[in-house]
Amino acid sequence: MRLKRITYENFRNHRFLTFEPDNGVTLIHGVNGSGKTSILEGVHYCALTKGLVSSTDGECLQFSADYFLLDSIFVSETEGQMGIKIIYKKEKDKQVIVNNSEIKPFSRHIGRVPCITFSPSEIMIVNGAPAERRRFLDNAISQTDRKYLDDLLAYRRVLHQRNALLSQLYAKIPVHQDMLDLWTENLSRLAASIIHARIRFIALFFYQFKRLYAQLSVDEDPSILYHSSLGKISQDISVDRLYTLFLSRYEETRRQEILRAQTMTGPHRDDLLFLLHGKEIKKYASQGQLRTFLISLKLSQHQFYAEILGEKPICLLDDIFSELDTSRTANIFKILESCGQAIITSAEKKGPGNVMTISVESLKGIKER
Protein backbone atom coordinates (compact mmCIF):
# COMPACT_ATOMS: atom_id res chain seq x y z
CA MET A 1 0.00 0.00 0.00
CA ARG A 2 1.25 3.48 -0.80
CA LEU A 3 -0.02 7.03 -0.90
CA LYS A 4 0.30 8.57 -4.33
CA ARG A 5 -1.05 12.04 -3.56
CA ILE A 6 -3.10 13.90 -0.96
CA THR A 7 -4.55 17.40 -1.09
CA TYR A 8 -5.51 19.37 2.03
CA GLU A 9 -8.07 22.17 2.18
CA ASN A 10 -8.65 24.07 5.44
CA PHE A 11 -7.10 21.26 7.46
CA ARG A 12 -5.29 22.38 10.60
CA ASN A 13 -2.85 25.13 9.54
CA HIS A 14 -2.92 24.20 5.84
CA ARG A 15 -5.29 26.34 3.79
CA PHE A 16 -4.35 24.46 0.63
CA LEU A 17 -1.49 22.02 0.20
CA THR A 18 -0.64 19.05 -2.01
CA PHE A 19 1.74 16.33 -0.84
CA GLU A 20 3.24 13.60 -3.04
CA PRO A 21 5.55 11.32 -1.03
CA ASP A 22 8.24 9.01 -2.35
CA ASN A 23 7.48 5.30 -2.70
CA GLY A 24 10.16 4.61 -0.08
CA VAL A 25 11.07 6.79 2.88
CA THR A 26 10.06 10.47 2.89
CA LEU A 27 11.21 12.77 5.70
CA ILE A 28 9.31 16.03 6.27
CA HIS A 29 11.35 18.53 8.26
CA GLY A 30 10.63 21.95 9.68
CA VAL A 31 10.37 23.96 12.87
CA ASN A 32 7.80 23.11 15.51
CA GLY A 33 4.35 24.43 14.65
CA SER A 34 4.97 24.45 10.91
CA GLY A 35 2.41 21.71 10.17
CA LYS A 36 4.49 18.53 9.90
CA THR A 37 2.23 16.47 12.14
CA SER A 38 -0.88 17.80 10.36
CA ILE A 39 0.35 16.24 7.11
CA LEU A 40 0.57 12.82 8.77
CA GLU A 41 -2.80 13.37 10.43
CA GLY A 42 -4.49 13.95 7.08
CA VAL A 43 -3.13 10.65 5.75
CA HIS A 44 -4.31 8.94 8.94
CA TYR A 45 -7.81 10.34 8.43
CA CYS A 46 -7.96 8.84 4.96
CA ALA A 47 -6.74 5.47 6.25
CA LEU A 48 -8.67 5.15 9.51
CA THR A 49 -11.33 7.95 9.35
CA LYS A 50 -9.97 9.76 12.41
CA GLY A 51 -7.10 11.94 13.56
CA LEU A 52 -3.65 10.78 14.53
CA VAL A 53 -3.61 12.43 17.97
CA SER A 54 -7.21 11.78 19.11
CA SER A 55 -8.43 15.21 18.07
CA THR A 56 -12.07 15.80 17.23
CA ASP A 57 -13.07 16.61 13.66
CA GLY A 58 -13.88 20.18 14.67
CA GLU A 59 -10.41 20.70 16.14
CA CYS A 60 -8.88 19.82 12.75
CA LEU A 61 -10.84 22.59 11.02
CA GLN A 62 -8.77 25.64 10.18
CA PHE A 63 -9.76 28.72 12.11
CA SER A 64 -12.62 30.68 10.43
CA ALA A 65 -13.20 27.91 7.82
CA ASP A 66 -16.56 26.16 7.38
CA TYR A 67 -15.22 22.83 6.11
CA PHE A 68 -12.13 20.75 5.56
CA LEU A 69 -11.45 18.39 2.68
CA LEU A 70 -8.85 15.65 2.35
CA ASP A 71 -8.63 14.28 -1.19
CA SER A 72 -6.23 11.36 -1.64
CA ILE A 73 -5.18 8.65 -4.03
CA PHE A 74 -3.77 5.37 -2.69
CA VAL A 75 -2.40 2.45 -4.68
CA SER A 76 -2.97 -1.05 -3.33
CA GLU A 77 -1.09 -4.11 -4.51
CA THR A 78 -4.34 -6.09 -4.32
CA GLU A 79 -7.12 -3.59 -5.14
CA GLY A 80 -5.35 -1.15 -7.45
CA GLN A 81 -5.91 2.60 -7.25
CA MET A 82 -8.35 4.03 -4.70
CA GLY A 83 -9.63 7.57 -4.40
CA ILE A 84 -10.48 8.46 -0.78
CA LYS A 85 -12.06 11.72 0.35
CA ILE A 86 -12.81 12.90 3.88
CA ILE A 87 -15.26 15.83 4.02
CA TYR A 88 -16.17 17.60 7.23
CA LYS A 89 -18.54 20.55 7.51
CA LYS A 90 -19.64 22.40 10.63
CA GLU A 91 -22.78 20.97 12.21
CA LYS A 92 -22.94 18.14 9.64
CA ASP A 93 -21.87 14.52 9.71
CA LYS A 94 -18.40 13.70 8.41
CA GLN A 95 -18.34 11.89 5.07
CA VAL A 96 -15.96 9.15 3.96
CA ILE A 97 -16.07 8.64 0.20
CA VAL A 98 -14.15 5.82 -1.50
CA ASN A 99 -14.11 5.70 -5.30
CA ASN A 100 -17.09 8.10 -5.36
CA SER A 101 -19.20 5.92 -3.01
CA GLU A 102 -19.98 7.05 0.52
CA ILE A 103 -19.00 4.55 3.23
CA LYS A 104 -21.29 3.97 6.22
CA PRO A 105 -20.64 2.96 8.91
CA PHE A 106 -17.03 4.13 9.01
CA SER A 107 -15.95 0.77 10.44
CA ARG A 108 -16.43 -0.70 6.94
CA HIS A 109 -13.40 1.33 5.82
CA ILE A 110 -11.04 0.03 8.52
CA GLY A 111 -8.42 -2.26 6.98
CA ARG A 112 -8.83 -0.92 3.45
CA VAL A 113 -5.69 1.22 3.86
CA PRO A 114 -3.49 -0.55 6.41
CA CYS A 115 -1.15 1.76 8.27
CA ILE A 116 0.87 1.94 11.45
CA THR A 117 1.67 5.10 13.38
CA PHE A 118 4.12 6.48 15.87
CA SER A 119 3.65 9.72 17.76
CA PRO A 120 5.29 10.92 21.00
CA SER A 121 1.93 10.95 22.82
CA GLU A 122 1.62 7.20 22.21
CA ILE A 123 4.29 6.58 24.87
CA MET A 124 1.19 6.20 27.06
CA ILE A 125 0.76 2.78 25.48
CA VAL A 126 3.88 1.66 27.32
CA ASN A 127 3.71 3.60 30.60
CA GLY A 128 0.09 4.79 30.83
CA ALA A 129 -3.23 3.34 31.95
CA PRO A 130 -4.51 -0.08 30.83
CA ALA A 131 -7.03 1.59 28.51
CA GLU A 132 -4.12 2.80 26.34
CA ARG A 133 -2.81 -0.71 25.85
CA ARG A 134 -6.27 -2.09 25.17
CA ARG A 135 -6.73 0.60 22.51
CA PHE A 136 -3.41 -0.34 20.91
CA LEU A 137 -4.39 -4.01 20.92
CA ASP A 138 -7.87 -3.38 19.51
CA ASN A 139 -6.59 -1.09 16.75
CA ALA A 140 -3.83 -3.53 15.83
CA ILE A 141 -6.13 -6.54 15.49
CA SER A 142 -9.02 -4.68 13.84
CA GLN A 143 -7.00 -3.79 10.74
CA THR A 144 -6.44 -7.47 9.92
CA ASP A 145 -9.50 -9.19 11.42
CA ARG A 146 -12.95 -7.96 10.39
CA LYS A 147 -14.73 -10.38 12.74
CA TYR A 148 -12.76 -9.01 15.68
CA LEU A 149 -13.83 -5.46 14.88
CA ASP A 150 -17.47 -6.52 14.53
CA ASP A 151 -17.32 -8.44 17.81
CA LEU A 152 -15.67 -5.50 19.56
CA LEU A 153 -18.35 -3.04 18.43
CA ALA A 154 -21.09 -5.48 19.42
CA TYR A 155 -19.42 -6.09 22.80
CA ARG A 156 -19.43 -2.36 23.58
CA ARG A 157 -23.13 -2.13 22.78
CA VAL A 158 -24.05 -5.18 24.88
CA LEU A 159 -21.81 -4.01 27.75
CA HIS A 160 -23.61 -0.65 27.75
CA GLN A 161 -27.00 -2.38 27.88
CA ARG A 162 -25.92 -4.78 30.64
CA ASN A 163 -24.49 -1.97 32.77
CA ALA A 164 -27.73 0.00 32.34
CA LEU A 165 -29.68 -3.03 33.54
CA LEU A 166 -27.35 -3.47 36.53
CA SER A 167 -27.99 0.18 37.42
CA GLN A 168 -31.73 -0.45 37.30
CA LEU A 169 -31.38 -3.50 39.54
CA TYR A 170 -29.25 -1.47 41.99
CA ALA A 171 -31.94 1.22 42.09
CA LYS A 172 -34.56 -1.52 42.59
CA ILE A 173 -36.40 -0.49 39.44
CA PRO A 174 -38.67 -3.38 38.39
CA VAL A 175 -37.17 -5.31 35.46
CA HIS A 176 -37.70 -8.81 34.09
CA GLN A 177 -35.16 -11.05 35.85
CA ASP A 178 -34.45 -13.05 32.68
CA MET A 179 -33.08 -9.91 31.00
CA LEU A 180 -29.84 -10.01 32.97
CA ASP A 181 -29.29 -13.66 32.02
CA LEU A 182 -29.86 -12.78 28.35
CA TRP A 183 -27.38 -9.90 28.33
CA THR A 184 -24.89 -11.97 30.30
CA GLU A 185 -25.02 -14.80 27.78
CA ASN A 186 -24.55 -12.42 24.85
CA LEU A 187 -21.69 -10.65 26.61
CA SER A 188 -19.99 -13.94 27.49
CA ARG A 189 -19.99 -15.14 23.87
CA LEU A 190 -18.53 -11.88 22.57
CA ALA A 191 -15.98 -11.65 25.41
CA ALA A 192 -14.79 -15.20 24.73
CA SER A 193 -14.31 -14.48 21.02
CA ILE A 194 -12.46 -11.20 21.68
CA ILE A 195 -10.05 -12.60 24.26
CA HIS A 196 -9.36 -15.69 22.14
CA ALA A 197 -8.41 -13.41 19.23
CA ARG A 198 -6.24 -11.23 21.48
CA ILE A 199 -4.30 -14.21 22.85
CA ARG A 200 -3.80 -15.64 19.36
CA PHE A 201 -2.59 -12.24 18.10
CA ILE A 202 -0.06 -11.80 20.92
CA ALA A 203 1.39 -15.27 20.36
CA LEU A 204 2.00 -14.50 16.67
CA PHE A 205 2.97 -10.87 17.19
CA PHE A 206 5.54 -11.50 19.90
CA TYR A 207 7.71 -13.56 17.55
CA GLN A 208 8.05 -10.51 15.27
CA PHE A 209 8.47 -8.16 18.22
CA LYS A 210 11.32 -10.02 19.91
CA ARG A 211 13.27 -10.36 16.67
CA LEU A 212 12.90 -6.67 15.83
CA TYR A 213 13.60 -5.48 19.39
CA ALA A 214 16.97 -7.22 19.18
CA GLN A 215 17.83 -5.03 16.18
CA LEU A 216 17.25 -1.85 18.20
CA SER A 217 18.60 -2.83 21.60
CA VAL A 218 21.39 -4.83 23.17
CA ASP A 219 21.22 -7.45 25.92
CA GLU A 220 17.59 -6.82 26.90
CA ASP A 221 15.00 -9.57 27.25
CA PRO A 222 11.46 -8.28 26.53
CA SER A 223 8.16 -10.05 27.24
CA ILE A 224 4.51 -9.34 26.50
CA LEU A 225 1.87 -11.00 28.66
CA TYR A 226 -1.91 -10.84 28.49
CA HIS A 227 -3.45 -10.06 31.89
CA SER A 228 -7.08 -11.19 31.96
CA SER A 229 -9.72 -10.20 34.49
CA LEU A 230 -10.61 -13.91 34.46
CA GLY A 231 -7.26 -14.73 36.00
CA LYS A 232 -4.49 -16.83 34.49
CA ILE A 233 -5.49 -18.45 31.20
CA SER A 234 -3.41 -20.63 28.89
CA GLN A 235 -2.47 -19.71 25.32
CA ASP A 236 -4.20 -22.78 23.90
CA ILE A 237 -7.56 -22.19 25.61
CA SER A 238 -10.62 -22.63 23.38
CA VAL A 239 -13.43 -20.13 22.73
CA ASP A 240 -15.94 -22.55 24.25
CA ARG A 241 -13.90 -22.86 27.43
CA LEU A 242 -13.62 -19.07 27.71
CA TYR A 243 -17.39 -18.78 27.25
CA THR A 244 -17.98 -21.24 30.08
CA LEU A 245 -15.54 -19.39 32.35
CA PHE A 246 -17.29 -16.08 31.72
CA LEU A 247 -20.73 -17.51 32.48
CA SER A 248 -19.37 -18.96 35.72
CA ARG A 249 -17.62 -15.74 36.73
CA TYR A 250 -20.67 -13.57 36.07
CA GLU A 251 -22.77 -15.93 38.19
CA GLU A 252 -20.22 -15.70 41.03
CA THR A 253 -20.06 -11.90 40.95
CA ARG A 254 -23.73 -11.19 40.19
CA ARG A 255 -24.47 -9.64 43.58
CA GLN A 256 -21.29 -7.51 43.55
CA GLU A 257 -21.99 -6.26 40.04
CA ILE A 258 -25.51 -5.17 41.02
CA LEU A 259 -24.13 -3.34 44.07
CA ARG A 260 -21.52 -1.60 41.88
CA ALA A 261 -23.87 -1.20 38.91
CA GLN A 262 -21.09 -2.25 36.53
CA THR A 263 -19.66 -5.30 34.78
CA MET A 264 -16.51 -6.29 36.64
CA THR A 265 -15.04 -8.90 34.26
CA GLY A 266 -14.36 -8.85 30.53
CA PRO A 267 -12.07 -7.56 27.77
CA HIS A 268 -12.80 -3.98 28.85
CA ARG A 269 -10.97 -4.67 32.14
CA ASP A 270 -7.94 -6.54 30.75
CA ASP A 271 -4.38 -5.32 30.27
CA LEU A 272 -1.09 -6.06 28.55
CA LEU A 273 2.02 -6.41 30.68
CA PHE A 274 5.25 -5.21 29.04
CA LEU A 275 8.36 -6.59 30.73
CA LEU A 276 12.14 -6.25 30.46
CA HIS A 277 14.12 -8.97 32.21
CA GLY A 278 10.90 -9.98 33.97
CA LYS A 279 10.23 -6.51 35.42
CA GLU A 280 7.31 -4.31 34.41
CA ILE A 281 8.70 -1.72 32.03
CA LYS A 282 6.54 1.23 33.11
CA LYS A 283 7.90 0.97 36.66
CA TYR A 284 11.60 0.45 36.01
CA ALA A 285 12.61 1.45 32.46
CA SER A 286 14.40 4.61 31.36
CA GLN A 287 12.85 7.04 28.87
CA GLY A 288 15.10 5.63 26.15
CA GLN A 289 13.97 2.07 26.92
CA LEU A 290 10.30 3.11 26.94
CA ARG A 291 10.67 4.79 23.57
CA THR A 292 12.59 1.86 22.07
CA PHE A 293 9.91 -0.54 23.31
CA LEU A 294 7.15 1.56 21.71
CA ILE A 295 9.02 1.87 18.40
CA SER A 296 9.55 -1.89 18.38
CA LEU A 297 5.83 -2.45 19.00
CA LYS A 298 4.94 -0.26 16.05
CA LEU A 299 7.49 -1.61 13.58
CA SER A 300 6.62 -5.18 14.58
CA GLN A 301 2.99 -4.33 13.90
CA HIS A 302 4.05 -3.36 10.37
CA GLN A 303 5.78 -6.69 9.76
CA PHE A 304 2.82 -8.60 11.22
CA TYR A 305 0.40 -6.80 8.89
CA ALA A 306 2.61 -7.43 5.88
CA GLU A 307 2.62 -11.19 6.56
CA ILE A 308 -1.12 -11.44 7.25
CA LEU A 309 -2.34 -9.13 4.48
CA GLY A 310 0.30 -9.84 1.84
CA GLU A 311 0.73 -6.08 1.53
CA LYS A 312 3.00 -3.64 3.35
CA PRO A 313 1.12 -0.99 5.33
CA ILE A 314 2.06 2.68 5.22
CA CYS A 315 4.23 3.93 8.12
CA LEU A 316 3.33 7.33 9.60
CA LEU A 317 6.06 8.23 12.09
CA ASP A 318 5.88 11.57 13.90
CA ASP A 319 9.04 12.85 15.61
CA ILE A 320 10.33 9.31 15.98
CA PHE A 321 14.01 10.18 16.41
CA SER A 322 13.90 12.54 19.40
CA GLU A 323 15.61 11.13 22.52
CA LEU A 324 17.31 8.42 20.45
CA ASP A 325 21.06 8.16 19.94
CA THR A 326 22.74 8.07 16.53
CA SER A 327 23.09 4.29 16.54
CA ARG A 328 19.38 3.59 17.15
CA THR A 329 18.39 6.23 14.62
CA ALA A 330 20.55 4.51 12.00
CA ASN A 331 19.03 1.12 12.92
CA ILE A 332 15.51 2.49 12.43
CA PHE A 333 16.38 3.84 8.98
CA LYS A 334 17.85 0.45 8.10
CA ILE A 335 14.64 -1.33 9.16
CA LEU A 336 12.48 1.17 7.25
CA GLU A 337 14.33 0.38 4.01
CA SER A 338 12.35 -2.87 3.81
CA CYS A 339 9.04 -1.46 5.06
CA GLY A 340 7.70 -0.02 1.83
CA GLN A 341 6.39 3.54 2.10
CA ALA A 342 7.22 5.47 5.28
CA ILE A 343 6.48 9.13 5.98
CA ILE A 344 8.49 10.62 8.84
CA THR A 345 8.55 14.03 10.49
CA SER A 346 11.59 15.57 12.13
CA ALA A 347 12.72 18.98 13.32
CA GLU A 348 15.98 18.41 11.44
CA LYS A 349 16.92 17.19 7.99
CA LYS A 350 18.59 13.80 8.46
CA GLY A 351 18.87 10.32 7.03
CA PRO A 352 20.88 8.38 4.43
CA GLY A 353 21.05 9.37 0.78
CA ASN A 354 18.14 7.20 -0.33
CA VAL A 355 15.69 9.17 1.84
CA MET A 356 13.63 11.90 0.17
CA THR A 357 13.66 15.01 2.36
CA ILE A 358 11.07 17.77 2.06
CA SER A 359 10.80 20.94 4.09
CA VAL A 360 7.29 22.02 5.03
CA GLU A 361 7.96 25.43 3.50
CA SER A 362 8.79 23.91 0.13
CA LEU A 363 5.87 21.50 -0.08
CA LYS A 364 4.12 23.43 -2.83
CA GLY A 365 6.43 21.94 -5.41
CA ILE A 366 10.10 22.11 -4.43
CA LYS A 367 11.48 18.74 -3.26
CA GLU A 368 14.98 18.02 -2.08
CA ARG A 369 17.11 14.92 -2.44
Image: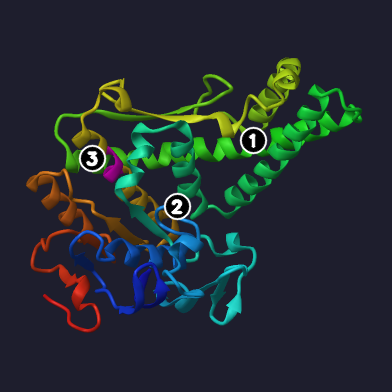
Quadrant for the C terminus, please.
bottom left
Q: Amino acid at mark 3?
A: Thr
Q: Earlier in the sequence, mark 1 or mark 2?
A: 2
Specify whether residue 293 is painted magenta. Answer: yes
Whether tag 1 and tag 2 are in contact, CB under 8 A, the answer is: no
Residue 191 numbered mark, or none: 1
Cα–Cα span, label 2 and label 3: 22 Å
**Residue 275 picture location, percent across and down:** 32, 26
- The residues colored magenta run 292-296
Task: Assign a secondary structure to mark 3.
Answer: helix
Question: Residue at the location (89% across, 29% down)?
Answer: 178
Q: CA distance from mark 1 to mark 2?
A: 26 Å
Residue placed most toward the observer, 207 or 49: 49
Q: Does dot 1 land on a helix, a strand or a loop? A: helix
Q: Amino acid at mark 1?
A: Ala
Q: Which residue is disc 2 drawn over?
A: 54
Q: Report the residue at 38% width, 68% height from top.
A: 1
